[in-house]
Amino acid sequence: MNKIAQYIHTHCIPGTPGGWERSKRMAELLGNPQEKLNIIHVAGTNGKGSVCAMLESVLRQAGYTVGLYTSPHLEDYRERIQINRQLIPEDDFYECLTLLIEEVIPQILAEGHAHPTEFEIWTMTAFMYFAGKTDIVILEVGLGGELDPTNIITKPLLSVITPISIDHSQVLGSSLTEIATAKAGIIKAGGQVISAWQEDEARKVIEEKSWQIGAESKILTKENIPFYQVALLGAYQQENCHLAVQALEWLREQGKIKFTPEDLAQGLAQVKWQGRLEYIALSKEKEIGILLDGAHNPAGINALCHELSTTWQKRNIILLLGILDDKEQLTMAEKIIPLAQKVIITCPDTGERGVHWQRVADYAAKLCPTGKVEIISEPENALRHGIAGLQSGDLFCITGSLHLLGDCRSILKQLFLADKQHIL
């Protein structure tokens, strides 16, 4: 698997949209495995992963064999491709990737296409692996929607859109209308789409797109949302949960799935999604703990700040922050840094997206009193330094990038897993 991973890193451009026609052609060469799947397609800006996890948990509880395709991974590439929350086995992963690399990609290149992106390769791997093994697949969009490799599917059971906000502006556009237009691209002619509450600009895009292509749409409101007993922390998860439940109810009304009230309750009570308000208690007596949250855009940071100001308002916030270059670094820093008693700035990624990570430190220096900010480039050193200095009442919050979160989770496992069973 190391050989395959090295090949992908050498030849592919992670995070850069590929040609939709190229993705379609790759699938054709594989026999269009995506057409053999029953898919719930999920797009949006924030909450996609949580909604996917909720849908998967309830359907699995109802007895279905459920494929789950999400991105990015935190620690292991295979996290992206799961069946009943079991990672794709290494042998299957290697077999699928080998087929792509040795047979499909050479044909693609011979036909004049550019080399597929890393995400296209993962997507085709998922389609191959899920075909013939799953009853339902929860398929998360990678970037945008319309031109995303996942959008080569033609007849999803349902299209689902989580809250839309500004993110990936370099690719999707700088306005909410542009971004919503890209994400509404997953709506299929004659199909059905259900959306979370949206700002007016985004809501209009979804409504107009649905009307234009004859799709049935439901857009939820923020009023009268019932309280759900869901295993994930955070007030915002209630809205995500409401979207997931309404999607499931609509599918049941159409006779596409079956589940009982008990399946719903138990599925929500048992759902897991790593890196979203994930709390690790280091000392219950001294109220010392670690909070990992994958907030990587202003909307995500807003939600995290709300939780820090309410649920953890009595704790001293020690912040480990790393934000990628292509994110709104200043906006995010301005929102969260004032909540912290101490800030450690680190590099979230050693690739091209992490070259200017120290800009966050410059912003922090302007936002904070002298001595409040430390700069430690290596995440492991920053993490160890932060933990070593924790005192009674401290909450060590790690956020700003899913890349940073993945690195920190791996390190925390090494530090604590042997003697703390409840850790991660």
Image (spheres, grey):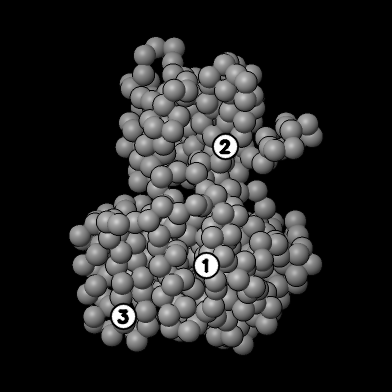
Q: Are marks 3 and 1 in contact (CB under 8 Å)?
A: no
| Depth check, front residue: 68 or 368 | 68
| Depth check, front residue: 263 or 168 | 263
Q: Residues within 10 Å of mark 2 (few under 14, many from 20)?
A: some
Q: Residue at x 58, y 48 (%)?
A: 274
Q: CA distance from mark 3 to mark 1?
A: 26 Å
| Depth check, front residue: 225 or 115 | 225
One can see residue 277 in this view: yes
Q: Quadrant of the N terminus?
A: bottom right
Q: Which residue is mark 2?
A: 279
Q: Determine which quarter of the picture holds residue 358.
A: top left
Q: Which residue is mark 3?
A: 216
Q: Amino acid at mark 2?
A: Tyr
Q: Quadrant of the C terminus?
A: top right
Q: Residues within 10 Å of mark 3 (few under 14, many from 20)?
A: some
Q: Determine which quarter of the picture holds residue 63.
A: bottom right
Q: Could you tell me residue 168's position as x and y percent?
A: 37, 54
| Depth check, front residue: 147 or 232 | 232
Q: Residues within 10 Å of mark 1 (few under 14, many from 20)?
A: few
One can see residue 147 in this view: no
Q: List the single residue furthest toward the top.
A: 370
Q: Could you tell me residue 368's position as x and y percent?
A: 36, 19
At numbered mark 3, what does the secondary structure look like: helix, strand or loop? strand
Q: Where residue 261 is drawn, which disc sits there?
A: 1
Q: Amino acid at mark 3?
A: Glu
Q: Nearer the viewer, mark 3 or mark 1?
A: 1
Q: Residue at x 64, y 77 (%)?
A: 134
Q: Amino acid at mark 1?
A: Pro
Q: Could you tell me residue 302's position as x and y percent?
A: 35, 40
Q: Is residue 194 left or right of residue 83?
A: left
At numbered mark 2, what does the secondary structure look like: helix, strand or loop? strand
290 relative to 31, above or below = above
